[in-house]
Image: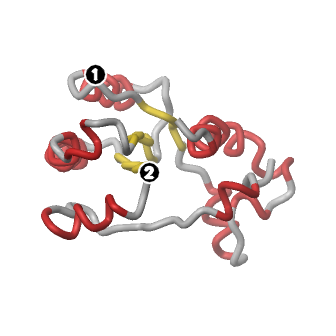
């Protein structure tokens, strides 16, 4: 699996955690989808709650002009951490787009100056499968 050409051609912005106020409003004018990565700790979940609530109150999100997706980082979907994350997100009317497990393949690829998508498929098959739904979500125009 390679990164779809359309997804690779669209601009991508990475922002610092806790973006708010005018900076958040400006960033939201530049995008049509927001991905919020959340790690499996109570601290990350609480910090994400605050941000997701602020994001939810933004007019462009309320009017469905911008879509929000959550990615469970460094966690397996069969774990207690994943269940806790899913329960937390139900209260915000959100769901997890993907779970990206902690894997040495990311470290090894970065060490070689590569991404997961630059590796031969047999080296990263499991991780590429985890990315599939997220990439499809990004491709949809909604």
Residue 75 or 1: which is nearer the viewer?
Answer: 1
- Horizontal and vertical percent position of residue 15: 34, 67
- Horizontal and vertical percent position of residue 71: 44, 42
Q: Residue at x 70, y 37 (%)?
A: 129
Pointers 1 and 2 in contact (CB under 8 A)?
Answer: no
State which quadrant residue 115 falls in. bottom right
Badge nearest the viewer, 1 or 2: 2
Residue 132 numbered tag: none
- Horizontal and vertical percent position of residue 90: 28, 21
Query: Colour scheme used in the picture?
Result: secondary structure
Q: Residue at x 78, y 64 (%)?
A: 118
Residue 90 numbered tag: 1
On the image, numbered disc 2 is attached to which residue? Answer: 32
Using a 10 Å C-alpha cutoff, classify the residue at mark 2 as few (fewer than 14 neighbours), some (14 to 19) or many (20 or more): some
State which quadrant residue 92 falls in. top left
Residue 123 or 12: which is nearer the viewer?
Answer: 12
Quick one: SS at disc 1?
A: helix
Q: Residue at x 19, y 47 (%)?
A: 58
State which quadrant residue 62 falls in. top left
Quick one: SS at disc 2?
A: loop
Viewed as shown, does residue 43 lie left or right of 82?
A: left
Q: Residue at x 51, y 37 (%)?
A: 99
Viewed as shown, does residue 39 lie left or right of 111?
A: left
């Amino acid at each position: 699996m390679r990164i779809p050409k359309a997804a690779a051609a669209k601009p991508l912005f990475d922002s610092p955690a806790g973006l708010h106020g005018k900076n958040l409003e400006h960033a939201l004018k530049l995008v049509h989808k927001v991905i919020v990565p959340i790690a499996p700790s109570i601290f990350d979940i609480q910090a994400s709650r605050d941000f997701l609530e602020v994001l939810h109150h933004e007019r462009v999100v309320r009017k469905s002009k911008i879509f929000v997706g959550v990615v469970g980082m460094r966690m397996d979907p069969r774990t207690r951490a994943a269940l806790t994350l899913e329960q937390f997100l139900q209260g915000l009317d959100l769901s997890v787009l993907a779970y990206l497990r902690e894997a040495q393949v990311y470290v090894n690829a970065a060490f070689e100056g590569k991404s997961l998508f630059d590796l031969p498929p047999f080296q990263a098959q499991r991780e590429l499968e985890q990315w599939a739904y997220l990439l499809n979500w990004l491709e949809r125009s909604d």
